[in-house]
Amino acid sequence: MAELDDWEREFDHTWANSAEHKEPSARARMLAARWKETPPDPAPFRADPGPAPRRTPWASTAMVIGCVAVVMIVIGWAQLRAAF
């Protein structure tokens, strides 16, 4: 029976939620003190970042093929230099 009482006591959310006073966090107190002197400027909830620049599919493909070609040329040149 004691185990059940301890379990109920540990998870008694109604008792915790019925507390009369809840102290704000340190950050909330800091911001409240700062905003008393200089209130923040109004800002939208989430600013619209605007459209991101998009690459066309062929440009991405050309970039990948170009990088692969450069790597193949560098490896071939290194093997050629090592052979002589």
Image: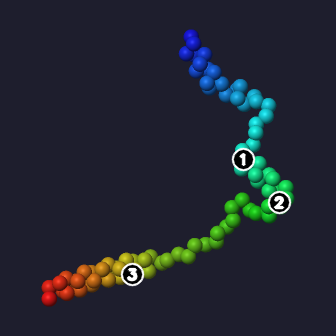
Q: Nearer the viewer, mark 3 or mark 1?
A: 1
Number of numbered markers? 3
Secondary structure found at label 1: helix
Is 68 situated above or below 5? below
Question: Sequence order check: which comes first, mark 2 or mark 3?
Answer: 2
Is 1 situated above or below 39? above
Question: Sequence order check: which comes first, mark 3 or mark 1?
Answer: 1
The circle on residue 62 is 3
Q: Quadrant of residue 22?
A: top right
Secondary structure found at label 3: helix
Looking at the rendered image, the quarter that the N terminus falls into is: top right
Estimate the x, y position of residue 35 in percent, counting from the top left.
Answer: 81, 56
Is 33 situated above or below 43? above
26 to the left or right of 58:
right
Secondary structure found at label 2: loop
Q: Amino acid at mark 1?
A: Ala
Q: Amino acid at mark 3?
A: Ala
Residue bearing the label numbered 1: 26
73 to the left or right of 48:
left
Question: Sequence order check: which comes first, mark 2 or mark 1?
Answer: 1
Q: Are marks 3 and 1 in contact (CB under 8 Å)?
A: no
Q: Quadrant of residue 61?
A: bottom left
The circle on residue 39 is 2
